[in-house]
Amino acid sequence: MEPETAGDPMSAQKWVRSSLRQLSRHLTAAGHPISHQTVGRLLKDRDYALHVNAKKVEARATHPDREAQFAYIATQRQAFAAAGRPIISVDTKKKELIGNFKNAGQVWSREAEAVNIHDFPSDGLGRAVPYGIYEVGTNHGMVCVGSSGDTPAFAVAAIAQWWEHRGAVAYPEADRVLILADGGGSNGCRPRVWKQHQQEQVCDRLGLTVTVCHYPPGCSKWNPIEHRLFGPISLNWAGTPLRTWETMLAAIRGTTTTTGLAVAALRLEGEYLPGLTVSQAEFQALLLDRHDVCPTWNYTLRPRLPTLPDPEAVPGGREVIP
């Protein structure tokens, strides 16, 4: 087995590069007739096992500011939690075809449900774009399901819906919110449109001060929403074809855990087209304060005061008192 064996230099893990039947043929050709079943049994006796690839390596996770950012996120979370302010973790879940399509997983039933052989989008009702908002302190989630693009405008619209439907009621005294987000995608640290819509739709319209902390590159799985909300939702609808929009919403709403997770879901209609741009002048007009620690990943947006009319332009020349 020596030439067939490879291993991890940092652990006792090892594997072979040939199948059991190939090893059986090699051994038989060398004068040792043996079945592939016996080869498998002998390998198990020598601490070999059948494995699949395991996603454990965080690509691009060697950024020099990685640990500093994780420590800063922990500090921000502690400060907001101590003040009783909302902390939300946000992200877009995997897009799903709505229709008679196969959904990965198993479900107890007397017979398997028949679904389409091919997953042609044209045979379905549309492609669902689920954007999730998870409240870290209350174990409550909301998923806004759209059918347009996964864009910064859509992400911010979902966050605004969360505040209007849930946040304003659950946190009546709050005037600040902490958002934990990935470093890329529609809510990434680089898109100007994400920041502009936060300014206009959340800060200016809702009167909230928004602090955003992004996870470092390659560390999206550390975002709480991934395992506290999206994981349970995937388990709840596993093996169930999402034939209609209501089926998907019901599966999301029906997601619970032993730790008390509760989830709301709603459709978010509208067209959210990609390709929007923000000019330099528009970007400079944002009330954006970058933090001293990792300023690309940490920043705060504050509400802009409404512009008052020019007294000279008011009939009679009288100043308007707000």
Image: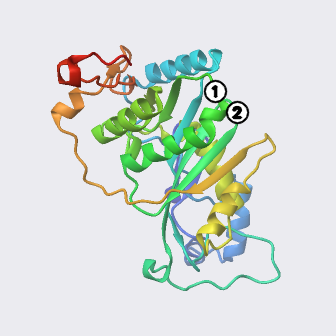
Name the foreground residue: 159 vs 206. Answer: 206
If the image is split into quadrants, where does the N terminus sit? bottom right
Is residue 113 toward the left or the right of residue 176 in the image? right
Categorize mark 1 by other alpha carbons within 10 Å: few (<14), some (14-19), many (20+): few
Q: Residue furthest front?
A: 316
Precedes in sequence: disc 2 or disc 1:
2
Camera-nearest residue between 101 and 122: 122
* Residue at horizontal 38 percent and vertical 27 percent from the top: 297
Q: Which amino acid does label 2 sit on?
A: Thr
Look at the numbered disc 2 and give the secondary structure of its residue.
loop
* Type of amino acid at the residue the image marks with label 1: Pro
Residue 138 marker: 2
Q: In this view, does 310 lie above or below 238?
A: above
Quadrant where the image shows the C terminus: top left
Residue 244, position as x, y percentages in the image: 60, 73
Residue 222, image x and y in percent? 54, 36
Q: Using residue 277 as the reference point, say whether residue 287 is left or right of it.
A: right
Disc 2 to disc 1: CB gap under 8 Å: no
Q: Residue shown at 17%/38% (left/top)?
A: 279
Name the mark nearer the viewer: 2 or 1: 1
Query: Residue 232's spot in the image, x, y percent?
Result: 68, 51
Q: Residue at x 33, y 26 (%)?
A: 296
- Place residue 212 in its image quadrant: top left
Residue 79 position by quadrant: top right
Q: In this view, does 96 lie above or below 2?
A: below
Residue 26: give x, y in percent of width and height. Answer: 54, 73
Query: As rendered, which of 59 and 137 lies closer to the eye?
Result: 137
Q: Distance between the residues labelled 2 and 1?
A: 15 Å
Quadrant of the rendered structure where residue 75 is?
A: top right
Residue 146 shown left or right of residue 13 in the figure: left
Task: Look at mark 1 in the image and give the residue it sits on.
Answer: 172
